[in-house]
């Protein structure tokens, strides 16, 4: 009886942990606030890959950091799971198979950003 109860509690805890895992919100959700980046990405090779390499493919699942209050605080967004990719992360694909190696020039043009005021 104790074993069955332990097993049931373990399964319940696993189900709760899985349901609490960050989930993808989709590029359309990102576009709402990041239009410049979205349009630039849409014209890039990343948007044309199969499967598509979208915002969350590089920046992590957005469910935990998508709230405006969190996104306006870079430290809070990173703590909540936002990934700010570096060239090393890009190199997990770039430079392998038929993907060109990542260069400083390529990294600088991954996608456009709003001009600083």
Image (tube, helix red, strand yellow):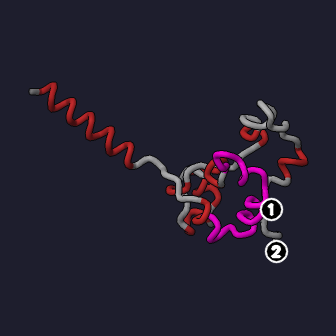
Q: Nearer the viewer, mark 2 or mark 1?
A: 1
Q: Position of residue 81 (x, y in %)?
A: 56, 50
* SS class, disc 2: loop
Q: Quadrant of the N terminus?
A: top left
> Which residue, as the protein is rendered here, is positioned at the far bottom?
117
10 Å crowding of disc 1: few (<14), some (14-19), many (20+): some
Q: What residue span does the magenta drawing correspond to?
A: 30-53
* SS class, disc 1: loop
In the rendered view, does 69 fall on the left or right side of 13? right
Q: Residue at x 64, y 50 (%)?
A: 59
4 vs 107: above or below? above
Name the disc covering residue 112, or none: 1
Q: Residue at x 15, y 32 (%)?
A: 5
Q: Position of residue 86 (x, y in %)?
A: 75, 43
Q: Nearer the viewer, residue 17 or 26?
A: 26
Name the disc covering residue 117, or none: 2
> Which residue, as the protein is rendered here, is positioned at the far right?
105
Distance between mark 2 and mark 1 Cα atoms: 15 Å
Q: Residue at x 58, y 57 (%)?
A: 76
């Amino acid at each position: 009886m104790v074993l069955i109860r332990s097993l049931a509690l373990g399964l319940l805890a696993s189900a709760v942990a899985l349901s609490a895992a960050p989930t993808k919100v989709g590029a359309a959700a990102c576009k709402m606030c990041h239009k410049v980046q979205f349009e630039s990405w849409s014209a890039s090779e990343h948007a044309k890959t199969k499967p598509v390499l979208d915002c969350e493919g590089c920046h992590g699942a957005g469910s935990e950091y998508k709230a405006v209050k969190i996104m306006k605080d870079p430290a809070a967004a990173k703590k909540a799971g936002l990934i700010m990719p570096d060239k090393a992360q890009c190199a997990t694909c770039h430079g392998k198979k038929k993907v060109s190696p990542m260069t400083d020039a390529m990294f600088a043009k991954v996608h456009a950003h709003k001009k600083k005021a």
